[in-house]
Amino acid sequence: MALAAGMAFPVAGGATSVPAAMAVWALAQPPVSAAYIGLSPNGAIAAGMLFQLLVSVL
């Protein structure tokens, strides 16, 4: 497994879990919940790609 994938799994795990999504859905309006559900996986992917870039440079 690539280092970036190993770093992205823990980041995405907590953000994309069903209990976390249900908590956001219960506390926020639907547009905010949809943004959370859409941006969380994308943020984890971006963090993994950035980490891979940093590892390859260093």
Image (tube, rainbow, N blue to C red):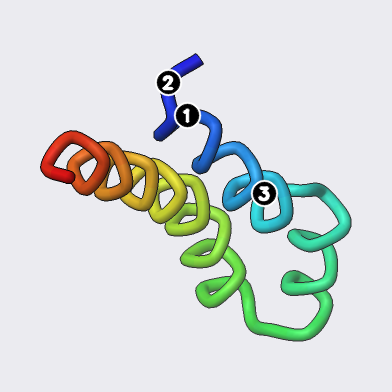
Residue at image x 79%, y 62%? 20
Q: CA distance from mark 3 to mark 1?
A: 15 Å
Q: Nearer the viewer, residue 54 or 11?
A: 54
**SS for callout 2:** loop
In the picture, measured across the screen, residue 43 lies left or right of residue 21, that is: left
In the picture, measured across the screen, residue 35 lies left or right of residue 17, that is: left
In the picture, measured across the screen, residue 19 lies left or right of residue 36, that is: right
Q: Amino acid at mark 2?
A: Ala
Asked whether the beta carbons under mark 2 and mark 1 sit within 8 Å of each other, the answer is: yes
Q: Residues within 10 Å of mark 1 (few under 14, many from 20)?
A: some
The residue at the far right in this view is 19
Q: Residues within 10 Å of mark 3 (few under 14, many from 20)?
A: some
**Looking at the picture, how far across and down is residue 1, in whole percent?**
51, 14
**Looking at the picture, how far across and down is residue 50, in whole percent?**
25, 49
**Pair 2/3: label in front:** 2
Q: CA distance from mark 2 to mark 3?
A: 21 Å
The earlier-in-sequence mark between 2 and 3 is 2
The correct choice, above or below, for 1 with respect to 4 in the image is above
Q: Nearer the viewer, residue 30 or 6?
A: 6
Judging by the rendered image, the residue that carries numbered circle 2 is 2
In the picture, measured across the screen, residue 24 lies left or right of residue 56, that is: right
**Looking at the picture, how far across and down is residue 8, in whole percent?**
51, 41
**Looking at the picture, how far across and down is residue 18, in whole percent?**
82, 49
Quadrant of the image occupied by residue 37: bottom right
Judging by the rendered image, the residue that carries numbered circle 3 is 16
Give the position of the C terminus as an image quadrant.
Answer: top left
The correct choice, above or below, for 11 with respect to 23 in the image is above
**SS for callout 1:** helix
Q: Nearer the viewer, residue 41 or 5?
A: 5
**Pair 3/1: label in front:** 1
Judging by the rendered image, the residue that carries numbered circle 1 is 5
Q: CA distance from mark 2 to mark 1?
A: 5 Å
